[in-house]
Image: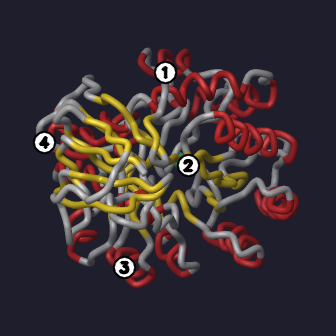
Amino acid sequence: MKLYHNARFETLDPANPFARYILCDGATIAYVGNDKPEGEYDTHDLMGHLVTPGLIDCHTHLIYGGNRASEFEQRLQGVSYEEIAKAGGGIRSTVKATRASSTLYETAAKRLAYWLKQGVTTLEIKSGYGLNLETERKMLQTVRALAQNFAVDIKTTYLAAHALPADYDDKDTYIDDTNIWMKTLNNEGLIDAVDAFCEGIGFSPAQTRRVFETASRLNLPVKLHADQLSNLEGAALAASYNALSADHVEYLSDAGVDAMAKAQTVAVLLPGATYYIRETKHPPIQALRDKGVKIALATDHNPGSSPILSPLLIMNMAATLFRMTPDECLRGFTVNAAAALGLSDRGMLKAGLRADFAVWDVAHSNELTYYVGHNPHIATIYKGEIRDL
Ligand SMILES: [Zn+2]
C-alpha cells in the first residue's frame, strides 16, 4: 500500500471534493480523506502540490503518416481547401502517407510523449487514415502496441467511415466493405468502439445508421463525428443508438440536445478544430448545461484540422472560445471524458476507482485553464505508481 500525502487533492467527487491523503492498494484507490489513515505504508510526499485525476483525452487521431504543414502554408497563401483536395491533398494525402508509412509506431510514440508529459493517463486513438482493411488493421495494431509499451491506457476506435477513399466511387459500396472489415478486426480483438463521420463531405445519416447497425450486432459501443459543419441531426441519430458520445456538435439542434440528454450521450467538444479552421459557429453550451448533458473536451489531434498536442491548451481554448468555466474544462478532461469512453472506473479520485492522478505546480486548478503555453506538470501517478517519463 502507498500513501500519497502533503498535497491538495482536488478529487472532483462531489461528496468529498478536497482531501489531504490518498492511499493506494496496488492500482486502486483504497482511501481518500483529510485524516491520515492508520497503519504502516510506503509514504510519498507530494511537496504541497495540487493533484487532480489523471487527464483523459477521449478523441484523437494520433496515428498517421506524414503531416499537412505544406497545405497549411498553401492555405495561408490563399489556395482554397477545394483546390488542395482536387490536387490530391487533404485527408487523401494523409491516407496515402499512412498506407505508405513504415514508421507509424515511431512517429506516434514521439507524439504520445507530449500527452504523457501533461498528466494524461487514458486516451483514445482512432483509425480512419487507412480506409482499407490492411491499413486500418495496421493503425489499430499500432495503438495496441503503444498501449503495451507505455504506462497509459489507450482505447481504440474503428473509424473506417471517415472519408471515401480514392479507390472507391460509391459510398454505399464502401460502407458495405467497412462493415465486413469491422467484423474481421473485431474478431482480432482490435476494436473497443466504432465511430463515423456523418456530414455532407463524409457519410449520410442512412450510411451512418448502417455502420451503427453492424456495430450493435457486434455489441460494440458507438460514437459519432456529428453536426460539425451542418445540421444533419447526427447527434440525435447517435443518441438513438445510445452512443457514448456525439463529438464536435457545433450545429447541434434543440432536438439533438434533448435526444442526447435522454440517452446520456456525452457531448465531446473540440475547440482545437474550431480554432484551426476558424469556425465561427460554436456548440450550444448553455442548452447542453440546461439539459444536463455531460460535456467532455478533447484535443481531436489530427494532421488536418487540429494539429495540437496539448490538452492544457485545449482547456484554455474551451474557456476563451466557448466561455466554459475552468471547472467545466477540468471535468471535460477527466470525469466527463471517462464517461465519453464508457469508463466508470476513473475520472475522479475516489475509493474503488483507478489510482491515476496528475501532480501540478499550481495553487488552484483554475490555473490549468488560465495559462497558455505553460506546462505545470510535475509528475503522474499511473495505477498507483509514479510514472517514469
Ligand atoms: Zn475527429
Residue farthest toward the front in the current orientation of the protein: 40
x and y percentages locating residue 160 in the rendered image: 72, 52
Q: Earlier in the sequence, mark 4 or mark 3?
A: 3
Secondary structure beneath label 1: helix
Q: Which mark is residue 124?
A: 2
Q: Earlier in the sequence, mark 1 or mark 4?
A: 1
Q: Earlier in the sequence, mark 3 or mark 1?
A: 1
Q: Nearer the viewer, mark 2 or mark 3?
A: 2
Q: Earlier in the sequence, mark 2 or mark 4?
A: 2
Q: Nearer the viewer, residue 216 or 121?
A: 121
Q: Residue at x 66, y 73 (%)?
A: 209
> For mark 4, what is the residue?
364
Q: CA distance from mark 1 to mark 4?
A: 37 Å
Q: Amino acid at mark 1?
A: Phe
Q: Nearer the viewer, residue 367 or 97?
A: 367
Secondary structure beneath label 2: strand
Q: Which mark is residue 261?
A: 3
